[in-house]
Amino acid sequence: MLKKLKYALILYIVLLAIPVLAVVIFDPYYHYHKPLKGLKAVLYEKEYQVVGTLDHFDYDAVIAGSSVAENYNNSWFDEIFGVKSVKAIRSYGATADLCSFLDRAYEDHDLKMVFYNLDPSSLKVDPEVTFESSGCPMYLYDDNILNDVKYIYNKDVIFEKIPYMLAKSFSDYDEGESYNWGRWKHFDLEMCISQYYRHPSVTPMQEASYRDEAGEANITLIENIVSAHPETKFIIFTPPYSMLWWDNAYREGDTEMYLRLLDFAVKRLSTYDNVRFFMFSGDRDVVLNIENNYMDTLHFSPEINRYMVDRMSRGEMEVDTANISEEIEKLRQMAYEIPEELIKPYEDVLIYGEE
């Protein structure tokens, strides 16, 4: 009887150990180590994989940003700027979250460059880290090994994530397309318009300064990292949201607020010797072309991501304290021209929401 119990106990321990070993060895979320030799870095779930990537991968550059930064191919930056990059992506590009990612990267890495996608919308939100409040798997974010049980005994990880990682590793999967979502999307007028619910009425323009406190706090968060790491070159850039986004900003009374925060950001951040700032927010060739470039009000095609990298590599679209006032005025003219004139050809097909 005791012998049977002994074998049963051994079998029980083995059965418990098998999933642990499988997860620890293959580690599809890279919680414990970088990819095993011979396996590719298969990155497709940012909430689960960014942290492990920052902790364990070999890199000297970070591409930080929101969902509009996911369609960059890392190799574009690597080849042009001579770096080895990884992505630090947060869906809404919240400043505090992205700065938290950068702080984490600096813990064990010396960064040559940071490519920071600065969404205008991220400047107005509260400067607070949102990982836990937004439901991120905190057992992957903290240092508490005890709650790793949620990872190592996770049936989805064992039966879905590990097989998927192995299948992709032995396919033509391009590691540079980490978190890329654009390959099978449609970027055309029908798709873009279908995702925009226009306000039936126009809210009076609000005071430009009404989000100053949040804006200054968010800019300060970026400043703190820039100033703490003078050895790192920061390329900060604003993405080209579509004309529909600017139309919505106008109808919500927020145009002047966004212009003011962009002006603040450039004037403060571009004064640092290790910062170059590029602004694509007013790139008319991109912003006004909703027939070819967008799938909704702000998400543009991977071709636009490539276009931005190429222009930045040539020093085009750069702004600083010397020219930002002029560039903001050009952006203001476009931001008002859109609701007053440029959107009129599309008004018959726009979808109007409720008040």
Image (spheres, rainbow, N blue to C red):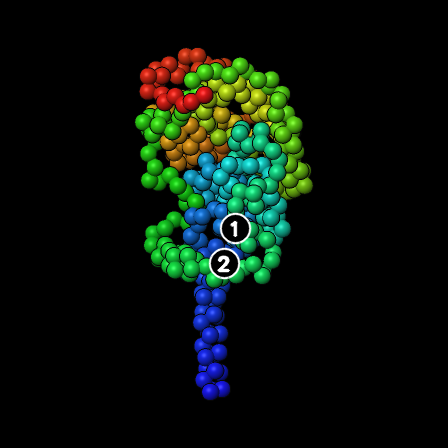
Residue 102: % across, % down: 59, 44
Left or right: where 97 falls relative to 339: right
Q: Are marks 2 and 1 in contact (CB under 8 Å)?
A: yes
Look at label 1 and name its amino acid: Pro
Left or right: where 209 falls relative to 156: right
Residue 305: % across, % down: 43, 35
Camera-nearest residue between 21 and 106: 21
Camera-nearest residue between 50 and 161: 161
Q: Quadrant of the C terminus?
A: top left
> Residue 151, which numbered label?
2
The residue most toward the front is 1
Q: Is residue 83 above or below residue 314?
A: below
Residue 171: % across, % down: 33, 54
Alpha carbons under labels 2 and 1: distance apart:
9 Å
Look at label 2 and name its amino acid: Tyr
Figure quadrant of residue 262 = top right
Left or right: where 247 falls relative to 122: left
Q: Residues within 10 Å of mark 1 (few under 14, many from 20)?
A: some
Element assignment for label 2: helix
Q: Is residue 59 above or below residue 9?
A: above
Q: Is residue 287 above or below residue 70?
A: above
Residue 4: % across, % down: 45, 84
Camera-nearest residue between 183 and 85: 183
Camera-nearest residue between 187 and 257: 257
Residue 124 in view, yes or no: yes
Question: Mark 1 = which residue?
Answer: 137
